[in-house]
Amino acid sequence: MEFGSRQVKSLPPYLFSIFHEKKKKLKQQGIDVIDLGIGAPDLPAPSFIIDRLTVEAANPDNHKYAPYGGCEEFKQAVASFYKKHYDVDLDPETEVLALIGSKEGIAHLIRAVIDPGDGVLIPDPGYPVYQSAVHLAYGTALPYPLDRQNGYVPDYQLLVEEDVEKAKLMILNYPGNPTGATVEMETFEKAVAFAKQHKLCVAHDAAYDLVTFSGYKAPSILQIPGSKETAVEFGSLSKSFNMTGWRIGYAVGNKELIQALAVMKSNTDTSQFLPIQKAGAAALNSDFSTVKENNRIYEKRMDRMLTGLSEMDIHADRPRGTFFIWAPVPKGYTSQGYVEKVLDEAGVILTPGTAFGKKGEGYFRISLSVPEERLQEAVNRMKIMKAGEHSNGP
Ligand SMILES: *Cc1c(COP(=O)(O)O)cnc(C)c1O
């Protein structure tokens, strides 16, 4: 590429677009590829949300620019959700901001709070956007390791003092992508205390807040007393309401951070289409029965996949949140080597753990976003793969 800034040119290619290319090629060869690599729900958005969108889209009043920070109805719905679900009080005017999906919110927050060279503590393994957004903001990504043996929570003892001094922001993500890790309040308590001690801010990415199982309820970082002095939380309707393409999410918490993000955004975008915000409000004001139904579907898929994996002698933890299974690769393989073998010999796309950071080595991620029969088919194909070294494919 001749044009493009240094930062853009030095960004590694987005992993999922590489897979997309490979999948297209295999499909052209007539191979029935099962894609367990995509981190998005396959289920449709609930009809009551679509109905609200349709009604609002027909009203010309909704065709104008929306207010910068989001419309009142949406911000109020976010605040009501926090009150009802977490018993957290939020001022819709100053502590809530509508987003065009949480991905842009996270990227813009990073740009809004760091100066060139500043550090951002990001989870490793973690959602790849954190690293690239820090890079594009001329910041320094400071990956902190998450390990299976301590439940994928930050170990502050392991952080280098120099990094901590450099850091202006710490990002957390629970239920976590890719690990499926879930936490109790104590993890957030420690993060808030750490942030206050070292004068940094915390952003908690709660994209999977409602995608939970087995009676587990994911806490909000804003439930920690005093957290609003340092923390913001990102929420999204993408995963819980199967609305990835709709692009609607929110940021809540610390007023100054919300204001900084609002300034960044009002100079970049002009909020989401009003009918989508209003449909999003309907989702947040609902009884969440559709979310529970989704979760039941994921849980059944999860059981089927975990059973299949254990029959292959792959022992993954059963997650209490997200629709991902984070599994160790069989002995003798690297993440990349195993994932390539499975694609070549079984026509199944998995995501190598290394796509999420160095600490992802030794793992692969399975997304449960295909129907049960397809998951079973994937298991059946993986079971009959040749044992041993990576072959050169079909
Ligand atoms: C999917 C995902 C997001 C982005 O969600 P949008 O609201 O659709 O932008 C953010 N964080 C994590 C960890 C995700 O997996």
Image (cartoon, rainbow, N blue to C red):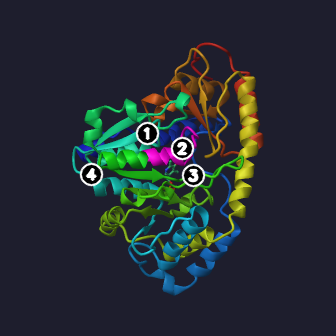
Q: Quadrant of the N terminus?
A: top left
Residue 241 spot, x, y in % from top left: 63, 60
Q: Earlier in the sequence, mark 3 or mark 4?
A: 4
| Mark linked to residue 114 | 4
Element marked by disc 4: loop
- Answer left or right for 340 relative to 313: left
Give the residue pinned by disc 1: 123
* Marks 1/3: CA–CA distance: 16 Å
Q: Give residue 113's position: percent from left, percent from top.
A: 29, 55
Name the residue that disc number 2 marks.
176
Q: Which mark is residue 208?
A: 3
Report if the beta carbon of the residue with label 2 is closer than 8 angstroms to ligand 1.
Answer: yes
Q: CA distance from mark 1 to mark 4?
A: 18 Å
Front position in the image: 213 or 247: 213
- Amino acid found under the numbered disc labelled 2: Gly
N-term-proximal mark, 2 vs 4: 4
Label pair 2/3, CB-CB below 8 angstroms: yes
The response on whether ligand 1 sits within 8 Å of label 3 is yes
